Structures are given as C-alpha cells and as structure tokens.
Image (cartoon, rainbow, N blue to C red):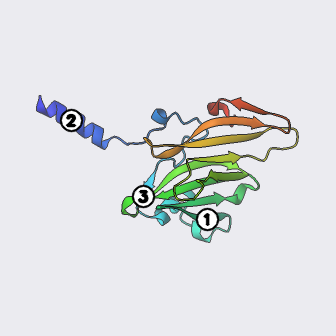
Amino acid sequence: MFPKYLSLLLIGIAAPSFSHEHTGLAAAWRGSHYGECYPSFSAGMSDVYGPGYASDENIDQKRAKYGANEMVVSTDRTSGTNASRTVFERRSGGRWCVVLTSPPVASLVPNRTADGSRKPSQWTTLTQAPPGYPATEIVYLWNRTAEIYLPSHCYHVSARKKKRLNCAKAYE
C-alpha cells in the first residue's frame, strides 16, 4: 500500500508545474517558452532566441524593476512593425522565468501601480493592422497559481469600435 502512495507522490513532484492544457492557453501561445524557467537570464535568452542572440541586432532587451521584482522585456524585431515579445522575471535563486510571451505585436504596455512598487497586475498588447482591418488587443492578467500572465480579455479594435472576442481565436 505504501509504495502505491509513494509512486503517486513522485508523479506529483516530477510532473511539470506548468501545462498549457491546465492554464487554457490558446493555440497562438502553445509551443512558446511560456512558463519555462532557466538558471540564468543568458540561458533563457539563448533558448528563446538562439545562441547568437547577443550579436543579433534585431533582438532588443529592456530591463524594468518593480519594487523587488526585476523583469526584462525582450523583442525580436526581425518581422518588422509587429514583433514578438517575451517578458522574463527574476525569481529566487537567480532563476529567470518566461512570464509572458506574445505573438507579433506593435506594443506591449504594463499597467503599473501608482507608486511602481509592485510588478504590473496586467500587460496589454496591440497589433498594428493593415488599413481597413481591425487591430488585435490582448489584456494579460497575472495568474498567481501558474505564476505567469495569461491572456484574459481579447478584442478587435477599429477606429469606431472595440469588439470582444474569444482569446482562443484572437490570432486566427
């Protein structure tokens, strides 16, 4: 009887704590580095952008500090105006974790606290759409359980209206 419970305990410990199926990530975010943690920032950047990221002029990094939270927003501008963005957060033991990754967007903006003492509770992305087509706006909210920002509210935005849509279909 004891070995049976021990094996269940080991499965629970060995199973990954992050799963796209459990957090409800739509197809646009699956296969990304969402929720991955790395022993160093350099290791994370190398995994996300490849080992030559440091010499790639299209890869930008912007550090931000929110109270005790240190984050880096990285951008791959290879594709032009709409660029993929990745937000890394420094965790205990010097680990760096990907807490947000977006498909190509024109902007990624944090919703900062009034005094800037805490990490943002949400981030918002917006695409730059071709003339005559709506832009896509995604609001990501912090999920304490998964310890990442998850797509929460999604919209198509045009000059005259903002239409809510299912986040699973945001980039279809």
Camera sees residue 75: yes
Instruction: Look at the numbered disc 1 and give the secondary structure of its residue.
Output: strand
Cα separation, mark 2 vs mark 3, equals 29 Å
Looking at marks 2 and 1 on the same chain, the residue that comes earlier in the sequence is marked by 2
| Residue contact at pointers 1 and 3, CB within 8 angstroms | no
Q: Which mark is residue 16?
A: none
The image position of residue 36, as x and y in percent, is 46, 50
- Label 1 sits on what residue type? Lys
Q: Position of residue 137 (x, y in %)?
A: 70, 41
Please give the residue where the numbered disc 2 appears in the rendered image.
7
x 62%, y 52%: residue: 110
Of the residues under marks 2 and 3, which one precedes in the sequence? Answer: 2
In the rendered view of the protein, which quadrant contains the N terminus? top left
Badge 2 marks a residue whose secondary structure is: helix
What is the crowding at mark 3: few (fewer than 14 residues within 10 Å), some, or many (at least 20)? Answer: some
Q: How many marks?
A: 3
- In the shown orientation, is residue 44 left or right of residue 129? left
Q: Amino acid at mark 3?
A: Arg
Q: Amino acid at mark 2?
A: Ser
What residue is shown with label 1?
62
Image position, residue 135 (x, y; %): 77, 41
- Res 83 seen here: no
Instruction: Between residue 72 and residue 41, name the one nearer to us.
Output: 72
Would you say the residues marked 2 and 3 are in contact, meaning their CB atoms lie under 8 Å apart? no
Q: Quadrant of the C terminus?
A: top right
Q: CA distance from mark 2 to mark 1?
A: 44 Å
Residue 92's x, y, as percent? 38, 59
Q: Which mark is residue 91?
A: 3
| Residue situated furthest bottom in the rendering | 55
Marks 1 and 3, how far apart at CA: 17 Å
The earlier-in-sequence mark between 1 and 3 is: 1
